Amino acid sequence: MRGLVKFARGPEGVALQELPEPVPVEGELKVKVLAASVCGSDIHAVNDERTTVMPVVLGHEYVGQVVETRGDVLGFRTGDWVMTLPACYNCGICSLCRRGLVTLCPDRRSIGFHVNGAMANYLTVPARYSFRLPTEAQTLEDLLPYALTEPLACVVRGVYEKIRVNPGDTVVVSGPGVMGQFATQVFKTRGAYVILSGLPQDREKLALARSLGADETVDSPQALEAAVRARNPLGADITCDATGVPASLETCMKVIRPLGVHLQLGMFGGTVPFRLDSIFDREVTYVPSNSTAVTTWPITLDLLARKQVTLSPFLSLRLPLEEWRAAFDAVIHRRVYKALLLPDNHFSFKEEFNL
């Protein structure tokens, strides 16, 4: 099989390689990958801004079909369509693991960073941390959006599990990229009034957000300030940075009310300059949300099953695995919401996946 491997430091240390097919061990599923999505964390890994254990196949956002099982796999069967919590290898016994916070386990190993991930024809994953699709897919178009379930779950953890959102709260989401779009939709499911903030070049993205439920969109810091003060002279109840850009965080701190809550979804990817006293000045509660917990996935899948969140508009680009550089470049230069790599783009979909 082929896999996209990070084998050495630097962007030049990534290449498509021929690899043996993985063999599942007790409690594992062997999964044929339909699609793997390029995440900002993959870019950080390529640029050595995130720890990886090399060599490793990249990719942790995916959807695929079970083709083999080994031992007790908790009811999973060949033919099931699945996704997996990335930090699926962990000690399983520490207090964090027992609470389902496996991403924070000191011994955790994540697919795509520490063990081989989804940018390949096949991967193996523990059944314990895998999840079935909430609906019976009938077509390729039904299945592909589920490759974005993991990043949606990252947002759901922040909005549903890390902070309290009251109906009617004024929420500012900064950044109309895919995470900001997801955050806007998820905050709406909690009854918030959501203002999505972008820049003049983001007009099409902001228009899409309005069509998906955003209450207001603005394209400048000045317009954001005016929109927030019109709702509450003291400022927004909650701000959420979905960019990982210091200027975006600074904007959030300018419009949040005293004793407000800031949710940090964007990863900065290195040392950044920021005036920490802007958090101190208003006694803001700063809440980072990193990846997902075991408890996050049922919430996320329920939102999808009830069609309260829409994923399909964000499938901007689909490319075969051989064209991974074009996919990564499109994400790096923000030309797309999400780029999908299809390891077996040549297959006959109905024949190979028995639909």
Image: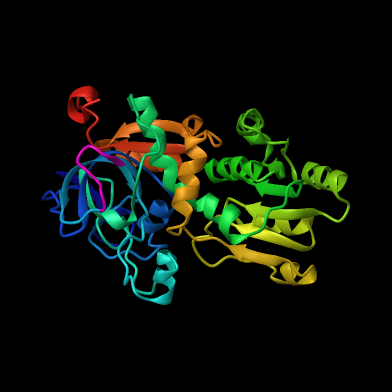
- Residue pictured at 15% horizontal, 52% vertical: 22
State which quarter of the image contains the N terminus. Answer: top left
Q: In this rendering, is residue 122 above or below 125? A: above
Counting from the top left corner in percent of width and height, residue 127 is at 27, 54
Which quarter of the picture shows residue 126?
bottom left
Please give left or right for residue 206 compared with residue 345 in the image: right
Q: Nearer the viewer, residue 290 or 143?
A: 143
125 part of magenta stretch: no
Counting from the top left corner in percent of width and height, residue 259 is at 78, 65
Counting from the top left corner in percent of width and height, residue 192 is at 71, 45
Q: Is residue 333 visible?
A: no
Please give left or right for residue 252 compared with residue 21 in the image: right
Counting from the top left corner in percent of width and height, residue 4 is at 25, 48
The residue stretch that appears in magenta:
74-81
Q: In this rendering, is residue 250 above or below 335? A: below
Q: In this rendering, is residue 354 above or below 7? A: above
Which quarter of the picture shows residue 66?
top left
Q: Is residue 112 visible?
A: yes
Q: In this rendering, is residue 223 above or below 265? A: above
- Residue pictured at 15% horizontal, 59% vertical: 25
Which quarter of the picture shows residue 72?
bottom left
Residue farthest left in this picture? 20
Number of numbered discs on residues:
0
- Residue pictured at 64% horizontal, 35% vertical: 201
Taken as a whole, is the magenta stretch helix, strand or loop?
loop
